[in-house]
Image (cartoon, rainbow, N blue to C red):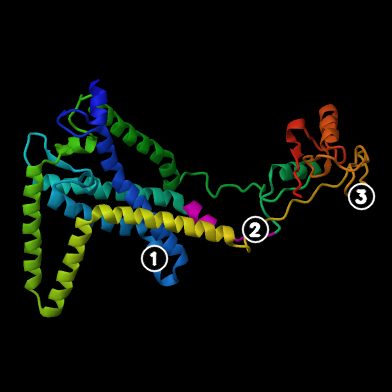
Amino acid sequence: MEGLERLEGLTELGGPSLFEVVGADRLAAAAAAALDHVLRVWGIRASRRFWWVRSYREEVIGIARLLLERQSMEGRNASAGEGFFGLIREAAAGGVPSARQKRLSLIFLVAMPYVQAKIDSLIRRPEDEELEAAPLPSGNFEPPVEGRLWAQALGQPAAGSVWRPPASLAWTWLDWARAVWPWVQALKEGWVLAYQIGYLFSKTPFSSPWLHLLGLKLRRMTSEDFIRLEQMLRSARAAQFAWADKHAMPIRLVLRALFKFWHFANDNFKLLLLFLAFVVKLADWWYTNEEVRDETAYIPPPPVRPPPAEDGLKLLSSREHCTICNQVRRNPAASTSGYVFCYPCIFKYAEEHGCCPITRLPCSVQEIRRLYESA
């Protein structure tokens, strides 16, 4: 029952529930992913003056996280996600975190996610560049599996099936990164999961390995914490405004405006996060509908049907008649060659002969496709 209590947070076990811990840990990652999506879409659709935003979105997200997490650590002794769930960090031996522990916390909250996102981006970059540089398909596009089978049966090379030798037999650093990086990620996630399981069953007071390395643990904020942090926050903001007042008049107004905006963003972090999620979902819905409404979307042409075989059935002059029964087609169905027959006729023929009656190309019962005509 102890694990269930820790899971649901029903008792005072010296720390928050596992749901709160995982939620606080995933909140910053979810917000970063949403901001990354916004920057990616904006970089694609904006003019060339803002193309750099898409190329350096990891840096933009890293700077935003640094400002947010630093303000949260200095003002609340917690990360932005932990503050969202009403959690606070304290030293393992008791007391508030030291200045060194706060600085090291920023490494795990900002630097480590930035390095991870940068490595992921470098590994995916060749595929992204190849996809972006690829022109719209014309007549020479990648055919379906049936098209490649037809080409092999006819002795003709299918489009996109030409083998290209590798540029070098030696592995590059990117090849090594692609091979090793998934294992590094798996080890990291497994390490975090082990700590979360141990925390769930009260085997350790640390909910993550990073907090263990820092000598910090999480607990819920109390009324005394709120009063103390509010006093610290007012003192820090008064010092900021006092520093801004030391400058000349134009710079003083700019600095005071920037500080007020930053304080407003921190005080309304929860509302801003919900608003950002709403904007991302609205943008997804809008651009998805825009692509659906686009009537100029490219539709690739169907592959060319293979010619009839010499020993196959002869094509009829009427396209409405079945070649097998010479009657008007009923319940049309297509073979792997693309020719259409009555479904009972082609089913029986493929079951007995295992090929298309016209081209003699292989065709099993499972490969027959029913056609449904709208009125």
At 23% from the left and 28% from the top, the residue drawn is: 6
Q: Tag 1, which secondary structure?
A: helix
Per the image, is 166 magenta?
A: no
At 49% from the left and 59% from the top, the residue drawn is: 287
Left or right: residue 292 compared with residue 174: right
Residue 160 screen position, x and y as percent: 66, 50
Which amino acid is tagged 3? Answer: Ser
Count of numbered circles in the view? 3
Quadrant of the image occupied by residue 65: bottom left
> Which residue position is annotated with label 3?
318
> Which residue position is annotated with label 2?
137
In the displayed image of the protein, which residue is found farthest to the bottom?
249
At 17% from the left and 55% from the top, the residue drawn is: 71
Residue 95 screen position, x and y as percent: 6, 39
Instruction: Write down the region rendered in magenta.
Output: 126-138
Which amino acid is tagged 2? Answer: Pro
Which amino acid is tagged 1? Answer: Trp
Point out the tag, 1 or 2, that comes first from the N-terminus: 1
Point out the tag, 1 or 3, that comes first from the N-terminus: 1
Predominant secondary structure, magenta span: helix
**Whether residue 161 is situated above or below residue 45 in the rendered picture:** above
How packed mark 3 is, by other alpha carbons closer than 10 Å (few <14, some 14-19, many 20 or more), is few
Left or right: residue 292 compared with residue 228: right
69, 81: nearer the viewer: 81
27, 364: nearer the viewer: 27
